[in-house]
Image (cartoon, rainbow, N blue to C red):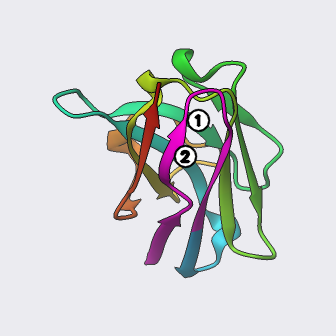
């Protein structure tokens, strides 16, 4: 098993940047592909970004292209999500997730075995 704890969310103004962190504990972190999803009130969970076990491959959902960057530090058991030029429509709870089922992970939430509790990001205009 692995436990995931997100941090770094908050209330920010549009146009600013934010870096979310997800600290993992338990099993060897480098054995998991990681991803970030987000969910706004009344909407379905949306894939934001994923990264392979080694960090060599990253990929993004359509709404995240260009402003979001996922990265990981396997020595620190942490995955990050950098969000630049925040927009009000980025307001959501952001979840970190992990899967050991594949080397790179996927954009489908059902493929992930472990989830954090989420961190709220609220962007004011």
Choose between 85 and 105: the one closer to the eye: 85
> On the rendered structure, is 80 left or right of 63?
right
In this orientation, does residue 107 appear?
no
Residue at the left extreme, as displayed: 42
In this orientation, does residue 116 appear?
yes
Image coordinates of residue 51 in percent, x first then y, are 67, 44
Q: Secondary structure at mark 1?
A: strand
Point out the tag, 2 or 1, that comes first from the N-terminus.
2
Q: Secondary structure at mark 2?
A: strand
Residue pointed to by mark 2:
35
Neighbor class of circle 2 (other Cα within 10 Å; few <14, some 14-19, many 20+) is many
Q: Main secondary structure of the magenta part?
A: strand
> On the rendered structure, is 85 left or right of 120?
right
> Which label is found at residue 123?
none
Residue pointed to by mark 1:
49
Residue occupying image coordinates x 50% and y 57%: 98
Image coordinates of residue 41 in percent, x first then y, are 21, 34
Total number of numbered discs in the rendering: 2
Residue occupying image coordinates x 24% and y 29%: 44
Location of the N terminus by quadrant is: bottom left
User: Does 78 sit above or below residue 9?
Assistant: below
Residue occupying image coordinates x 69% and y 73%: 77
Give how far apart the Cα atoms at labels 2 and 1 are. Answer: 6 Å
Image coordinates of residue 65 in percent, x first then y, are 66, 19
> On the rendered structure, is 54 left or right of 33?
right
User: Does 106 sit above or below residue 1?
Assistant: above
Choose between 15 and 80: the one closer to the eye: 15
Residue occupying image coordinates x 45% and y 76%: 3
Which residues lie in the magenta part? 1-22
User: Does 33 sit above or below residue 14?
Assistant: below
C-beta proximity under 8 Å, tags 2 and 1: yes
């Amino acid at each position: 098993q692995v436990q995931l704890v997100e941090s770094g969310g908050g209330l920010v103004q549009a146009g600013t940047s934010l870096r979310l962190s997800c600290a993992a504990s338990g099993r060897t972190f480098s054995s998991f592909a990681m991803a970030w999803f987000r969910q706004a009130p009344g909407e379905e969970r949306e894939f934001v970004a994923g990264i392979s076990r080694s960090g060599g491959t990253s990929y993004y959902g359509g709404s995240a292209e260009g402003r979001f960057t996922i990265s990981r530090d396997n020595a620190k058991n942490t995955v990050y999500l950098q969000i630049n030029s925040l927009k009000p429509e980025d307001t959501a709870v952001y979840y970190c997730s992990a899967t050991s089922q594949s080397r790179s992970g996927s954009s489908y939430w059902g493929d992930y075995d472990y989830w954090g509790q989420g961190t709220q990001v609220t962007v004011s205009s």
